[in-house]
Amino acid sequence: MGSIDGYTMGLAPSSQIKTLKLFDDCTYNSSTENPAPEANLEDQCEQASDCESGVSGTDNGQEVHVFKNGLTRVHEGDKMRGIIRNKFLSSLSTCGLHTEVEAIHKKVYSGVMCQAKYQSFCVYARAMEQNFGGSANVKYAWYGASKNELNDILSHGFGHSTNTGVYGGGICLSPADHPIGSFQSSVAEEDGLRHLLLCRVLLGRTEIVRPDSGQSNPSSEEFDSGVDNLASPRKYIVWSTRMNTHILPEYVVSFRTSTGLEGYQRISRPLRRPSSAFIPFSALITVLSKSLPPDAIKVIAKHYGDHKAKKITRHELIQRLRNIAGDKLLLVVIKSHMDKMKALQTSFLRNCNNRGGNSGLQEWITSLRLGIT
């Protein structure tokens, strides 16, 4: 991030919204459904480190009706809208989600108090630069919650959040290229509309934070924030003491998901018991142990034990499982299990035709139990 001295000395809003560096460097064609392959959003986020990117500007866009004041609509045909929309849809489609973006709105930092908040973000960014000798590690990230919580954040800043707890006393956000983690934290309205915040985040130097660590601050002065994985993070953890200085909301994406997402809906409705054969939790833990670190498996097993001891509800167990394993991995496991069920069912029907109903049924039940317990 370059020097912000000139900008912090005079923070008057410009007459129009300037184009963020995040989008300047992306290859974009408004006639195509998806951005060019080389336009990796996370790579571009790493370059979006100049506070003089113009988030304080205003335009003549209509005021949003879903949220309170302070947002302007990013209209159809706008380059920024196209890139945000296409990257958002592309990222969710890789997880099997078919999504329609209803609107994108931009947070306008034009009032005195908003300018103070924006300036504070810039000052902290410069301080982190000087402290680290070069980079404040600025990233773009998603935050999902209910409409009411997002309204409060846009009006007053981050406060008590439902998106905390599993990773200690921190706010969890998802990397720009992986919005699925924040999607599961969003709350659908009665008409099915959901909302995600696209924020700029000062990560600084990161450390691994384990699930249910109870951590509420950096483990030492060497670190500023947390991640679930240093090499390929899927969660950014910003400590509650820094959430209003190190996170700057910039866009709100309002969207709907297709009602045909049967696989995903089975996970997103935890209180609904499956009507078909299901995978026992003990078997699920065994399968997940092949993809998750031992510490995460221990935490999942502990939650399962708490559920059996009636210390937590089934809903709480599933929510904690989703937060640790992630819906993408769970979808893969469930799909694999259902494919196995179909294969066993086909075998059962074949045996029934060849050997008679009762004999085939008994053999199929035996093979089913051996396969999943």
Image (cartoon, grey):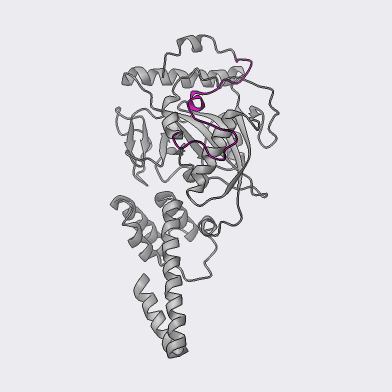
Task: Tell me, yes or no, whether the highlighted magenta stretch contains residue 370.
Answer: no
Residue 145: which quarter of the image? top right
Q: In the picture shown, does residue 217 fall above or below 194?
A: above
In the image, residue 15 lies at what x, y percent? 64, 15
Left or right side of 89 for 47: left
Q: Looking at the image, can residue 310 be seen?
A: no
The residue range painted magenta reads 13-38
Q: Looking at the image, can residue 168 be seen?
A: yes
Residue 359: which quarter of the image? bottom left
x 59%, y 32%: residue: 81
Left or right side of 4 for 102: right
Q: Main secondary structure of the magenta part?
A: loop
Q: In the picture shown, does residue 271 fall above or below 90?
A: below
Image quarter of the C terminus:
bottom left
In the image, residue 201 lies at what x, y percent? 45, 29
Residue situated in front as seen by the camera: 305 or 144: 144
